[in-house]
Image: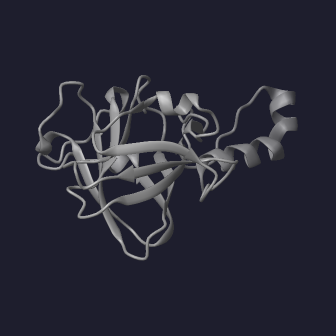
Amino acid sequence: MNCFFVKIRTFLLTSSLIAAFGIILLPPGCSSQDRDAKVLFDFEHDSDLDRLSWKCGSLYSRSREYQSSGEFALKVEMYPSAQWPGFGFGVRDGWEGYRQLSLAVFNPSDSEITMTCRIDDSRHNPPYEDRVNHKVTLEPGTNFLRFDLEQLRTSGTKRALRLEDICCFLMFVHSPPERLAIFVDDIILE
């Protein structure tokens, strides 16, 4: 069960104990360093587009199609004229204290799309072997992606990522043979 929701349930069940004795009870498996869920992007505002990293051969727009919640999702169109089209965003605050990154991705095509998720903990464009490069296969329809942050390892050295130093997340396809589109929503740290 998600630690965030367990904390809420525990709080509701024990609020009188907390009020009476000043005791904060955490369920097993949750530490006092866990943070509440943080929505990084829900694409409900135009300003969300300004926080994305532009990638050559990609077109971004907010769309009322295929959202997982709210009114909008991010539509990412990826063109064959580019080698690595996709989307990404910079990270300022690090991800320490969180357990997972989750996002909803809708694939409107009838075919699978294989993409790479790249996560860096160095601002100096680390080489392939010193960053996370995780392949994901997007089935037609809705895909819920979840990354266990404690299990993230670099591709070559198998080093654990320094969560406090996470600086970017990218999701891209290599040299698409034709125009591809995906819809992304609810990028959340939990």
Q: Is residue 121 above or below residue 179?
A: above
- Position of residue 29 measured from the top left corner of the image (x, y, whole percent): 54, 49
Position of residue 77 measured from the top left corner of the image (x, y, whole percent) = 40, 52
The relative height of residue 103 versus residue 50 in the rendered view (above or below) is: below
- Which residue lies most toward the bottom here? 110
Q: Which residue is depicted at the point 49% across and 67% down? A: 108
Residue 30 in picture, x, y percent from top left = 56, 44
Q: Residue at x 33, y 42 (%)?
A: 170
20 or 47, nearer to the observer: 47
- At x 41%, y 23%, the residue is 92
- In the rendered image of this protein, does residue 140 appear above or below residue 118? below
Split into 4 quadrants, where in the image is the C terminus? top right
Q: Is residue 157 left or right of residue 93?
A: left
Q: Quadrant of residue 21?
A: top right
Residue drawn at x 34%, y 45% as measured from the top left: 58
- Vertical position of residue 94 compared to residue 148: above or below: above
Q: In the picture, which quadrant includes the N terminus?
A: bottom right
Residue 123: image quadrant is: top left
Image location (x, y in percent) of residue 173: 27, 55
Numbered circles on residues, count: 0
Q: How is the image coloured?
A: one colour
Q: Which residue is nearer to you in this view: 130 or 47?
A: 47
Q: Depth check: give the residue in front, 177 or 169.
A: 177
Q: Is residue 93 left or right of residue 151?
A: right
